[in-house]
Image (cartoon, rainbow, N blue to C red):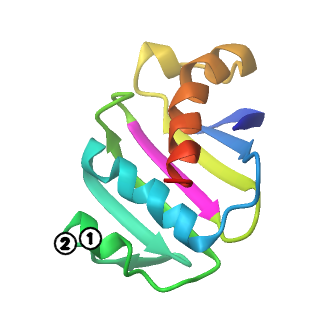
Amino acid sequence: MLLIGVKQDGAWLTSRWELTYPAGWNGILNALSSVYEYYGSLEILVDNHLVEIFNKRDIMKIEEAANITFRGKSTIIGVPISITMYNQVKDVDVDVSMSSVEFNKADYKSFNLSMCQYLDSIELAMYR
């Protein structure tokens, strides 16, 4: 993914990323399924409505919509994060809590270094 921009919004770093290709719904669900077990207290919202998921298999049953947000504390990067992906669109919105030294300011270069590999892994999971 390509980082378009990052800014501070209260206690969060708000960023916009661009996928290599527009994502279809099944690809988005594949990506979400790949990170499901790496989040504490994961919440999933479809078109801004909370969806109950009881296990990883339930993710692939989510009905197609305009967007999906998954949020919780990432066990990989160690802070709360919210990722919103849009059906058939290249834009991805990512909000990261500024609760660690690594994410303490909205600096394009350091934020890109911290998040790019993580988000690239999520994007690659769309095509599994």
| Residue 21 higher or lower than 74, as above or below | below
Residue furthest to the bottom in view is 63
Dot 2 falls on a residue whose secondary structure is: loop
Q: Position of residue 95 (x, y in %)?
A: 56, 44
Q: Position of residue 21 (x, y in %)?
A: 76, 53
Q: Which residues are magenta?
A: 80-85
Residue type beneath disc 2: Phe
Q: Residue shown at 36%/78% (left/top)?
A: 51
User: Residue 92 magenta-drawn?
Assistant: no
The residue pinned by badge 2 equals: 54
| Residue 81 higher or lower than 126, as above or below | above
> Gap in Å between the C-alphas at discs 1 and 2?
8 Å
Q: Is residue 112 left or right of residue 78?
A: right
Residue 109 position by quadrant? top right
Q: Is residue 116 visible?
A: yes
Residue type beneath disc 1: Arg
The residue pinned by badge 1 equals: 57
Q: Residue shown at 59%/45% (left/top)?
A: 94
Q: Is residue 12 visible?
A: no
Q: Residue shown at 51%/44% (left/top)?
A: 122
